Amino acid sequence: KFDDLLATVPTGLWIDGGAREANSGSRFDVVNPATGEVLTSVADAGVDDAQAALGSAAAVQKSWAATPPRERSIILRRAWELVVERTDDFALLMTIEMGKTLAESRGEVAYGAEFLRWFAEEAVRVGGRTATAPSGNGRILVTKEPVGPCLAITPWNFPLAMGTRKIGPALAAGCTMIVKPAEDTPLTMLLLAQVFADAGLPAGALSVLPTLQAPTVVAALMKDSRLRKVSFTGSTGVGKKLIEQSADQVLRTSMELGGNAPFIVFDDADIDAAVDGAMAAKMRNGGEACTAANRLLVHNPVREEFTKALTARIAATKVGPGYEEGVALGPLINAKQRNSVAALVDEAITAGARVHTGGSKVDGDGFFFEPTVIDEVPSGSRILTEEIFGPVAVITGFDTEEEAIERANSTEYGLAAYFYSRSLDRALRVSAALESGMVGVNRGVISDPAAPFGGVKQSGLGSEGGSEGIDEYLNTKYIALTP
Ligand code: ADP
């Protein structure tokens, strides 16, 4: 029943401005996680295909870099318009290949497309600076140049936005880009490649390489001296490997890695607002977000009230295929991910955690897991330290602000953190004390294309979005002038 839509999506490798089969001729299936059924298949890139993509990226790098910023901007702007025009197609495509609800997919289309508009605007604002040398006998001229051909490796949880957040600034800066989408969700990026071609992007400036052989294909590209940068969003483990591999050619790197976001509710918070925020921070995207609230830390005086209200909301969440009316929670991405969520929850329950609602897989087709609230999790349980990536809220209590901050920071991650309080003093103090790249104060959603997204500690390197985002794709050149 999705055939009309699927017929408009390229399923080959997108290389040199068009879709083609892999040299090996092999393809792999794309599955609907709500049913386990095969939707279609896509070409499976090998090392030789990747080298062809890099060849065409390298071949147009110079002319793309020399294209007037205004022209690059107009192409990005046109791509934004085309994605927005095709909101229904992109939304349904993401829902069927990834599982999130249609409402959330529409939200992602707006969010993901916005990176193209934002960076269309940034493309014409790349500056530099000039100064007089302190000695007085020279001038310092600082210019910005595109870093060159880039590789983006993206995850499956935001199939459009994780691509546009990298493609937008790269193209704006004058870089060419190869995208290696996640194997579970290659279709959205392939449709985007088609849209960019329709928007007038020169062949070779953007390639999309679905593959089941990510480790070998990526390693081969990263050893190739024509590549100059890698930008990755995914798990910390894979990110560390890529940082190691980037040493070979001393590549620029941007890393958006895992998170273990604390969500703190102080006793001076607006509890209704905090419950709304927790629903968003925990349940948005089915909990499959690196910014998802992983640990709900609640001040003991308000813990019971908060737990009761949140449990009522989570228990009322309708589970089903994301394309069905009224559904608020879709399936997890695949069986492996569901098993990993189930294992974390089972271990916690066996160790003595209390279940307020949910707690198990949903029987039947598709990879569904019940929306879940647990508390009284014994310390030492893996669910308190590992990224859950599922619709499971874990609540623990605390007595003092110091304790909350100490616990919030006791993780190797540092991506997002959230807290609720009505006190301005506390808001400023706690924002400063939290060891994370992003802090949400009295809100459960923080992502904004106009703001720098990124983590500290083992959550990553660099920022995406905002005026900072384009810097990741620019090198600084210093020219010494004698007057
Ligand atoms: P997740 O656990 O959320 O799937 P991963 O970090 O495994 O996150 O995957 C994110 C992206 O990294 C995907 O596109 C995946 O194909 C890719 N990937 C996984 N392993 C490697 C690797 N060894 N080298 C390069 N890319 C990889």
Image: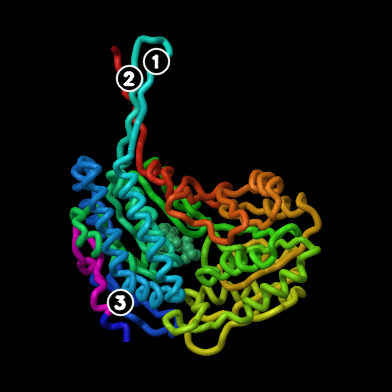
Residue identifier under label 2: 480
Residue identifier under label 1: 133
Residue 95 drawn at (x, y percent) = 40, 75
Camera-side residue: 124 or 352?
Answer: 124
Which mark is nearer the camera, 2 or 3?
2
Report whether residue 152 is seen.
Answer: no
Q: Amino acid at mark 1?
A: Ala
- The residue segment tinted magenta is 5-23
Residue 422 drawn at (x, y percent) = 69, 54
In what quadrant of the picture does the C terminus appear? top left
Residue identifier under label 3: 41
Magenta region includes residue 248 = no
Residue 125 drawn at (x, y percent) = 33, 39
Camera-side residue: 342 or 274?
Answer: 274
Magenta region includes residue 20 = yes
Q: Amino acid at mark 3?
A: Ser
User: Disc 2 on helix, strand or loop?
Assistant: strand
- Please state if 358 lies on the left or on the right of 232 as rendered: right
Residue in view at x 50 percent, y 75 percent? 332
**Disc nearer the start of the sequence (1/3):** 3
Which mark is nearer the camera, 1 or 3?
1
Q: Quadrant of ligand 1?
A: bottom left
